[in-house]
Image: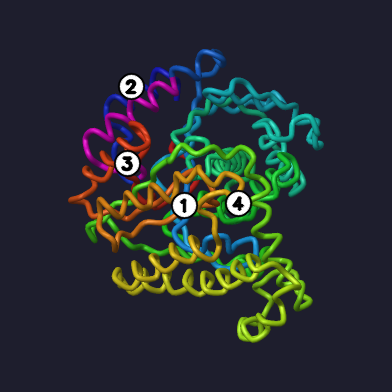
Amino acid sequence: MTAKELISRLNDGGFDELFSALYGGDEKTLKTQTLRWQSAAERFCEPFPDHDDLHLFSAPGRSEIGGNHTDHQRGCALAAAVNTDAVAVVAFCESGRIRLFSEGYGMNEIDLSDLSVHEEEKGRTIALIRGIAARFAQMGVSVGGFDAYVTSSVLSGSGLSSSAAFETLVGTIIDTQYNGGRAGAIEIAKIGQYAENVYFGKGSGLLDQTVCSVGGFVFIDFRDTENPVVKKHDFDFEKAGYCLCITDTKGSHSDLTDDYVAIPTEMKAVAACFGKEVLREVDEEQFLKEIPALRGRVSDRALLRAIHFFGENRRAIEEAQALEDGDIDRFFTLYRQSADSSAHLLQNLYAAKKPTEQGIPLAIAVSKLILGESANVRVHGGGFAGTIQAFVPVDKSAEYITGMDELFGKGSCQALRVRPVGGVKIV
């Protein structure tokens, strides 16, 4: 399909049914997405003018629902793909090169004859592309070249996992075209994690990539990290009268690496007291009995964070079951318990080194002023700075979004939908 044919089909509503499933079916949303994809097709032609067979790909962001900081201890988590996404207009070729122009970041180009780790690329987009291609090559896939124009509504720093969406997007492109789609969603997630760990230089878990790749509400048990148990759940919060809102408190993540690293380090220090690598391997009853003896061997905060893990791991399982049973009241009770545990035991609402910068606690407090003390609101993702999450009654959503935008700036609060599919080829 040429760019002209693609744009014509977009304007004629040829993708409206699919867009409705991915983004929502109201007229404003469909118009916005049509214009967005049309712009992407037009902009593809600027760096890549010599193609006449274009394809479209999309991969969603994700929102963590339950299981805050459990995945790195091989625990359980509940998360959902959302209707913000990274999208690509792609043309395949046998150039032996991948050229990917990312809106806002510029051109990235790799030679497929060189898929070794480049130390100077660590921390950059090009490292993810090279790492994903390398992993497919290691699996025996003959990766050919392609040109791509990528744009994303999963904003960096939004807490919706822009990097995992991008990894899923690139993995889906290669798997679909050069591997016959045989890798599947879980393997694509593992490939993205590999690229992030080895080539990009960030020691991430597998949660974000899995949710972005699988789509929908996803429960994941990471006891066996090589073969995680993944189960999708079909619960419609919109039909239940709620929308999912994410608010960016505009806090900076700079200088917070030590805070993030401390959480798994302290949890593993407790596990080591029992001769184990991670807390999932430790018997909870034995841990609870040994707390007095452990004090002094590890810090008080490490003990509190371990208590959080055991409770949070159970809650993630119970939250998933509540969704399966359609018991929204039970789900929200567990959700609020999880929020309290993150605040008081895990202690990831603000950085101790920046005690006066408390955007997340402020956002939660104001959310409760708007929605009531029983508001379903919590820290979102890794914490310390960044975003909060709230399930807001639909009839209060306009008031809530206005209140959050007044506090943190226009556009700070997004009302999201759960997206039923992960990485996908549209055409």
Mark 2, Cα crowd under 10 Å, few <14 / some 14-19 / many 20+, is: few
Closer to the camera: disc 4 or disc 1? 1
Which residue has dot 2 on it? 8
Which residue has dot 1 on it? 380
Q: Secondary structure at mark 2?
A: helix
| Whether residue 95 is situated above or below residue 294 in the rendered picture | above
Of the image marks 4 and 3, the number of the one nearer the N terminus: 4
Question: From where the camera sits, is residue 142 visible?
Answer: no
Q: Picture coordinates of residue 343 (x, y %)?
A: 48, 60
Of the image marks 2 and 4, the number of the one nearer the N terminus: 2
Which residue has dot 3 on it? 404
What amino acid does circle 4 point to? Answer: Ala
Q: Picture coordinates of residue 256 (x, y %)?
A: 62, 44
| Whether residue 398 is situated above or below residue 337 in the rendered picture | above
| Whether residue 224 is situated above or below residue 351 in the rendered picture | below
Left or right: 239 as drawn, with respect to 156: left
Question: From where the camera sits, is residue 257 visible?
Answer: yes
Nearer to us in this view, 74 or 272: 272
Report the magenta stretch's main SS.
Answer: helix
Q: What is the tally of numbered marks visible in this picture?
A: 4
- Residue at image position (24%, 33%) is 28
Q: Which residues are magenta?
A: 22-41
Which residue has dot 4 on it? 189
Q: Quadrant of the N terminus?
A: top left
23 part of magenta stretch: yes
| Whether residue 46 is situated above or below residue 381 in the rendered picture | above
391 part of magenta stretch: no
Q: Quadrant of residue 198?
A: top right
What amino acid does circle 3 point to? Answer: Met
